[in-house]
Amino acid sequence: MKLLSKVLISIGVIVLLYALTMSQDLKSLVNHDKQNYIIISGIILIIGFGLFLFDKQNAITNPQIVAQHSNYETTFKKFLPWIIVAVIVIGIYSWSAGIYNKAVSYEQDIKESWGNVQTSYQRRNDLIGNLVNTVKGAADFEKSTLTAVIEARAKATAVTIDPTNISPEQLAAFNKVQSGVSSSLSRLLVSVEKYPDLKANENFLKLQDELASTENQILTARTRFNEAVKPYNNNINTFPRNILAGFYGLKEKPYFEASVGAEKPVEVKF
């Protein structure tokens, strides 16, 4: 009984120390696990100390059972190595399964965030199509400018990404074509300055406002995508989780980065 109580106390201390060393930088899922580990360690410690005190009291009040306890401890020692191995195996399994399960949960958040990114960019593409049709009605409008917008929009539409297997190169390519759309659209809007009738066109003004709103939605969606990627990358990159991340095939996911020149926004006056 005394040996069992010592084993339980040792396991409780180990679990508690592991819980206390868990990172505070990760999101609520990890913090929830940390609370569970602390609760489990507390239960184990209470049982261990309870058995220890109970055994001590029995030894004092009933000296005749000391010999029996000695036999129990001899038998328990035979199975102790197997018990330790079982505890270690269960602990490793729970730990490794937790890494994978958290990655799956975070990946679902990334998929959702990426869906919002695609929706925002698709909304902009639809508005650009309507804008081009409106501008086409203006006499002698620069065809080269319209062609550049149409081609950039076509290139952006052709790029598709699977958020579960996204790579830095894929995201960079996606960012590049979307930046091309932004640049060509900015040039088109600057060119409109030469056409007073277009500037006064009610449909054009409405599309301009909707495009400005959509650009804000795109910025928000990109930011939230980065926020969804961060806990996933922390989960697979922090030690000792990175030991099993490679075994599971979990790879770091890239972040959206600011486009070149984004710190100098184009000023368009209407």
Image (cartoon, rainbow, N blue to C red):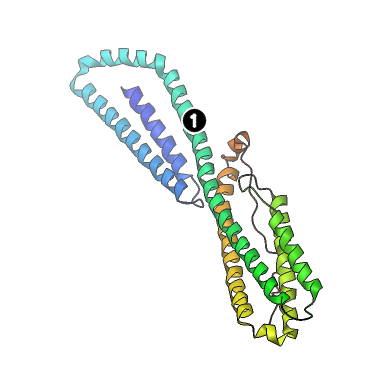
Q: Point out the image quarter for the C terminus.
A: bottom right
Which residue is at the far right?
144
Residue 143 x %, y %:
80, 73
Residue 21 x %, y %:
48, 44
Q: Residue at x 32, y 23 (%)?
A: 2
The amino acid type, in three-letter code, at marker 1 is Tyr
Q: Is 116 placed above or below 260 here?
A: above
Q: Is 17 placed above or below 151 here?
A: above
Which residue is at the far left?
61
Is 231 in front, or is 228? 228
Is 19 in front, or is 218? 218
Left or right: 63 as drawn, with respect to 129: left
User: Residue 201's quadrant in the figure?
Assistant: bottom right
**Are there few (<14), some (14-19), or many (20+) residues within 10 Å of tag 1?**
few
Is 62 in front, or is 144? 144
Q: Is 173 placed above or below 10 here?
A: below
Q: Which residue is mark 1?
A: 93
Identify the element where label 1 is drawn.
helix
Q: Point out the image quarter for the N terminus.
A: top left
Is 50 in front, or is 177? 177
Question: Can residue 270 be seen in the rendering of this structure?
Answer: no
Residue 49 x %, y %:
30, 32
Q: Residue at x 48, y 45 (%)?
A: 22
The mark tally for this picture is 1
Left or right: 121 as drawn, with respect to 79: right
Q: Residue at x 28, y 16 (%)?
A: 69
